[in-house]
Amino acid sequence: MPYVGRFAPSPTGSLHAGSLVAALASFLDARVHGGSWLVRIEDVDEARTVPGSADDILQTLRTLGMQWDGELIWQSRRSGLYQQACTQLGEHVFGCACTRKEIEQASGRLGSDGAAIYPGTCRNGLPAGRQARALRLKVPPPGPDSRISFHDQWFGDVSQDLATDVGDFVLRRADGYWAYQLAVVVDDALQGVTDIVRGADLLDSTPRQLYLQRLLGYPAPRYLHVPTVSNARGEKLSKQTGATALDVRNPLQPLKQAAGFLGLDVEDAVTTGMFWQRALAAWERLLGETQERDAGA
């Protein structure tokens, strides 16, 4: 099957150093494998979209020499597809009346992502006098069916118990927007994505997405999660933690910084053309070392 990769930024601000690392890794992986590299604008959360930021991200990618293949996809225009998938899930979906505060008070347990684990309040029916605010997906009870395991090409074998570590998770939010977990699974399947290269901050989401893929009959892609860039306080670098927009007046500088963070030796590159030659070769060597490590494990 031909390799299809993708980069899926959220248009909540300009591209920054952290998002460039993920973009670079996914771009290099696609090119090393002779595959396609798609770009998808993940603006399903329209309330957080910053006007003009999608165009800014796309122009930054072009300036850095990262041209995508095929047409751009905008999640905000695909809500009908997410509804179809939700309908297909049938009895696995239930309406939930709980507020975030109620869940935190009733749960008493935090998941691996730091959020309160849903206590199952509405999974067998809404409490009297309450109306559904969100839609959730039922996860299997604790046991073999609830444990989702996969091999990550960077971090190795990963396993998570959806019942004890996550709980029933949201498919459509209380504000009416479709949740990331459902939208990303539908889009990756419909776009034929075979390989997902992204930041390690999304490693914890992968078992939920694999479970949705299983229920919907979608093939599971290969995954590679690269380390995330942190700020001086040790927080993941993001728009919310004060990440600044990339300065691409000299494209070589941010490219070399991102490559260096990934452990790629490109220091002798003095032009962007030379950078891409060095970076592709370095990424191929890195993949080879990773495969040797896995073979010896």
Image (cartoon, rainbow, N blue to C red):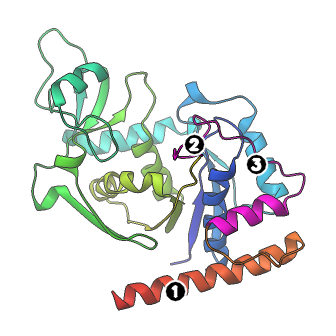
Residue 237 located within the stretch drawn in magenta: yes
Circle 2: element type: loop
Quadrant of residue 123 in the image?
A: top left
Q: Which mark is residue 289?
A: 1
The residues tagged by marks 1 and 2 sit, at their Cα atoms, a distance apart of 32 Å
Which residue corresponds to the image point at 33% horizontal and 58% vertical from the top-left?
Answer: 210
Task: State which mark lies toward you, 3 or 1.
Answer: 1
The residue range painted magenta reads 232-261
Q: Position of residue 290 (x, y in %)?
A: 48, 82
Q: Residues within 10 Å of mark 3 (few under 14, many from 20)?
A: many
Which residue corresponds to the image point at 46% horizontal and 52% vertical from the top-left?
Answer: 201
Q: Which one is nearer the viewer's eye here, 5 or 290? A: 290
Work out which residue is located at the far front of the displayed protein and give it: 232
Q: Which mark is residue 58?
A: 3
Work out which residue is located at the far top of the displayed protein and give it: 129
The residues tagged by marks 2 and 3 sit, at their Cα atoms, a distance apart of 13 Å
265 relative to 42, above or below = below
18 relative to 30, above or below = above
117 relative to 226, above or below = above
* Earlier residue among tags 1 and 2: 2
In the visual, does 72 lie left or right of 168? Answer: right
The C terminus, quarter of image: bottom left
Q: Position of residue 184 (x, y in %)?
A: 47, 49
Q: Residues within 10 Å of mark 1 (few under 14, many from 20)?
A: few
Quadrant of residue 118 in the image?
A: top left
In the visual, does 235 lie left or right of 64? Answer: left
Which residue bears the numbered disc 2? Answer: 42
Quadrant of residue 271 in the image?
A: bottom right
The residues tagged by marks 3 and 1 sit, at their Cα atoms, a distance apart of 32 Å
Q: Position of residue 63 (x, y in %)?
A: 84, 56
Type of amino acid under label 1: Glu
Type of amino acid under label 3: Leu
